[in-house]
Image (cartoon, rainbow, N blue to C red):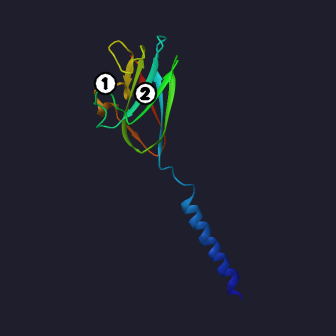
Amino acid sequence: MANLPALARCVLAAGMIVSTAQGAPAPLAASLRVTVEGVTPAGGTLRVGVYDEATFPVLPDTPLFKREIGKIAGNVVVTFERLPPGTYAVKAVQDVNNDGRWEMGEPSGVSNGVARDNYDGAAVVLQPGVNMATVRLR
């Protein structure tokens, strides 16, 4: 009987170690908060897309994930939730005439401020949890 309290303490301590080791579950998905700067007062729809290397150069644009925001003004923050961690690039266009595609003269930009066709320069590595990117429209 004298060993029972010691045994109980060992079981309790083992349970605390397992609980502490597991802790709060780590997020398995990533979120991406994209700040789009340079939206003009010309109106239209802001189209923001997240691409992998295979979809980045495809025409017409076919993002893996997209958001469209109408009635835009000033800087806009767009959030993508539950993305698989990995490497992506972001493209944004202010579709001033609302025809669903980018045309010469419409403000557009790519993550990291690189040329529209430079996936490696535009790449953003998403880790589980919250990630940030900025796109400047020109």
Q: In the rendered image, which quarter contains the N terminus?
A: bottom right
In the drawing, does residue 125 fall left or right of residue 72?
left
Q: Quadrant of residue 91?
A: top left
Instruction: Give the crowd class for mark 1: few <14, some 14-19, many >=20 residues within 10 Å.
Output: some
Q: Which residue is mark 2?
A: 48
Q: Quadrant of residue 127?
A: top left
The secondary structure type at the circle numbered 2 is: strand
In this rendering, is residue 27 above or below 59?
below
Rendering coords of residue 137 (x, y %): 41, 19
In the drawing, does residue 100 fall left or right of residue 22?
left
Q: Quadrant of residue 11?
A: bottom right
Rendering coords of residue 7 (x, y %): 65, 81
> Which residue is outermost to the front?
99
Disc 2 residue type?
Val
In this rendering, is residue 70 above or below 88?
above
Rendering coords of residue 61 (x, y %): 33, 28
Q: Which residue is mark 1?
A: 116
Q: Residue at x 66, y 76 (%)?
A: 9
**Cβ atoms under marks 2 and 1 closer than 8 Å:** no
Disc 1 residue type?
Arg
- Judging depth in this view, the residue of 68 and 136 nearest the camera is 68
Q: In the rendered image, which quarter contains the C terminus?
A: top left
Rendering coords of residue 89 (x, y %): 36, 33
Q: Residue at x 47, y 50 (%)?
A: 28
The secondary structure type at the circle numbered 1 is: loop
Q: Earlier in the sequence, mark 2 or mark 1?
A: 2
In this rendering, is residue 133 above or below 106?
below
Question: What's the CA distance linking mark 2 and mark 1?
Answer: 13 Å
Q: Residue at x 36, y 24 (%)?
A: 113
Viewer-side label of 2, 1? 2
Instruction: Give the crowd class for mark 2: few <14, some 14-19, many >=20 residues within 10 Å.
Output: many
